[in-house]
Image (cartoon, helix red, strand yellow):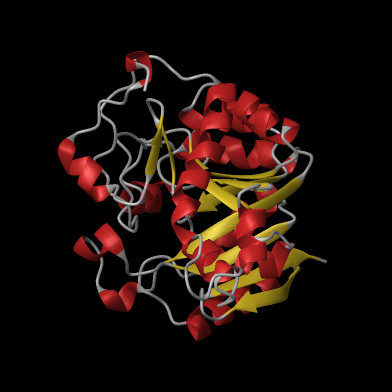
């Protein structure tokens, strides 16, 4: 690797990022669990069920191995890259992330139970989930990166915490997600644990979302005993006016287990009850669900 593009990653973080392919100075790729399941014909992710993407052709990546919040429910390591010395170009990240995906796939060749047709297709990803780890909108050329993937014939899902409304306004992905766990500034400070309040910026991003073209999704991460009050989220849904709402359970995985008890993870029945109440309050309609992922999809009528 070119020394100018080598990340300064602490050894502890390298251990935490086992299974990741590091791309350049601040990006990474990791095979999704559902991609690996799909290759073995053992199921597909809820995004395929809800939106029609092909799980085995989805590239999961981040252009920003760092985050500006310390959410209590995050399963990822919070000790991310301490600082960036120069930014990699969008075309470099796009090209190298596809190569990284192929390197990760190379071990599946000849493996028992792998669908060889799907594996061949997986080497040519046609969908990018820019959501792996960290906060992607802090990569200053994210709009160019989305365009680079588009130029390669790929659809793009971008998931953001909404703290950078200027970038939310600039990007034009195929599907834009704003991920919400908080419904007020007080809950934002308690659940997202930012270094200072970003609540006004999140509210601005919701206003920007309402005016965007393309498909727009609000993802609600639901934590039992902390935020499962549909009435409090209803005004945020009205402000953002998304095409879809994903009501999804917090999953008691990874580093979140150090901060939350197991009973903070809702059952699918809890998520469904929340979604039905939110539908009643907002006029959206429950359209689909995935019990294994504990997620319910609502769509505007």
x and y, in percent, of residue 161 in the image: 49, 44
x and y, in percent, of residue 29 in the image: 45, 43
Q: Residue at x 16, y 42 (%)?
A: 12
Left or right, residue 279 beside residue 300: left
Name the one closer to the observer, 111 or 273. 111
Above/below status of 38 relative to 26: below
Q: Quadrant of residue 250?
A: bottom left
Residue extending furthest front? 110
Name the one closer to the observer, 221 or 96. 96
Q: Quadrant of residue 25?
A: top left
Q: Residue at x 69, y 75 (%)?
A: 288
The N terminus appears in which quarter of the rendering? Answer: top left
Q: Residue at x 53, y 60 (%)?
A: 220
Name the one closer to the observer, 252 or 234. 252
x and y, in percent, of residue 43 in the image: 58, 76
x and y, in percent, of residue 157 in the image: 63, 47
The C terminus appears in which quarter of the rendering? Answer: bottom right
Above/below status of 237 relative to 88: below
Left or right, residue 205 beside residue 221: right
Look at the image and tell me whether residue 187 can be seen: yes
Residue extending furthest left? 12
Q: Residue at x 52, y 51 (%)?
A: 179
């Amino acid at each position: 690797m070119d020394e100018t593009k080598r990340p300064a990653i602490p050894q502890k973080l390298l251990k935490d990022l086992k299974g990741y392919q590091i791309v350049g100075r601040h990006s990474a790729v990791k095979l999704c669990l559902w991609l690996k399941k799909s290759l073995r014909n053992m199921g597909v992710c809820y995004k395929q069920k809800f939106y029609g993407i092909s799980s085995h052709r989805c590239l999961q990546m981040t252009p920003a191995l760092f985050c500006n919040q310390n959410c209590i429910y995050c399963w990822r390591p919070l000790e991310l890259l301490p600082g960036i010395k120069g930014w990699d170009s969008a075309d470099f990240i796009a090209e190298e992330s596809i190569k990284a995906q192929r390197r990760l796939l190379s071990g599946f060749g000849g493996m028992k139970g792998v669908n060889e047709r799907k594996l061949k297709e997986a080497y040519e990803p046609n969908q990018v989930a820019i959501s792996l780890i960290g906060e992607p909108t802090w990569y200053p050329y994210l709009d160019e990166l989305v365009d680079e993937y588009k130029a390669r014939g790929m659809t793009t899902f971008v998931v953001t915490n909404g703290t950078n409304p200027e970038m939310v306004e600039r990007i034009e992905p195929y599907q834009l997600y704003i991920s919400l766990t908080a419904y007020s500034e007080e809950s934002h400070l308690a659940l997202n644990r930012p270094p200072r309040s970003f609540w006004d910026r999140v509210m601005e991003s919701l206003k920007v979302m309402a005016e965007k073209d393309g498909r727009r999704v609000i993802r609600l991460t639901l934590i039992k005993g902390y935020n499962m009050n549909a009435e409090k989220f209803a005004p945020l849904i009205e402000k953002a006016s998304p095409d879809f709402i994903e009501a999804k359970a917090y999953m008691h995985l990874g580093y979140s287990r150090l901060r939350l008890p197991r009973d903070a993870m809702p059952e699918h029945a809890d998520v469904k009850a929340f979604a039905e109440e939110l539908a009643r309050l907002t006029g959206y309609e429950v359209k689909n669900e995935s019990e294994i992922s504990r997620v319910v999809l609502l769509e505007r009528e």
